[in-house]
Image: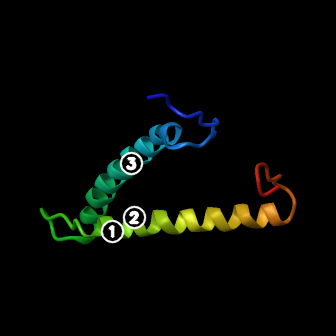
Amino acid sequence: MPVPFQPHIPLNPCSASPGLALLKMCLVTGVGLWVKFYSAMFAPAGTFDYLSGYLFIFLVGMGGVAISIFFDRERRAGRIKTYGANS
């Protein structure tokens, strides 16, 4: 069965998956370190507050929202040039 022609898409899932794997590796490692240091500061001795990992994920997400807002403001101001179908 012949495979239909598919044009090259720069950010297709195959090219994005190494970046997502790296992101997952950094987040999992970050949560582990966060839980270790957060528990050392705020939990009773000898215990780990694993639910504090959700706080880390929330803070990373808020950082992502802030970066997205920053880039949108820069694009609207004309300091970032848009390429592609919406340009």
Pair 2/3: label in front: 3
In the image, 53 versus 7, the foreground residue is 7
Residue at (55, 42) in percent of width and height? 12
Instruction: Give the residue drawn at x 76%, y 53%.
Output: 85
Whole-Å distance between the Cαs marked 1 and 2? Answer: 5 Å
Q: Percent position (x, y) of residue 15?
A: 52, 37
Mark 3: which secondary structure? Answer: helix
Amino acid type, label 3: Lys
- Nearer-the-camera pick, 85 or 3: 3
Going by the image, does 9 lie left or right of 52?
right
* Residue furthest top in the image: 2
Badge 2 density bin: few <14, some 14–19, many ≥20, Cα 10 Å: some
For the N terminus, the quadrant is: top left
Instruction: Specify the quadrant of the image occupied by residue 50.
Output: bottom left
Image quadrant assignment for residue 69: bottom right
**In the foreground, 26 or 17:** 17
Determine the CA span between mark 2 and mark 3.
11 Å
Element at label 1 = helix
For label 1, the residue is 54
x and y percentages locating residue 72 in the rendered image? 73, 65
Amino acid marked by disc 2? Ile
The numbered disc on residue 5 is none
Pinpoint residue 32: horizontal percent, then vertical percent: 28, 53
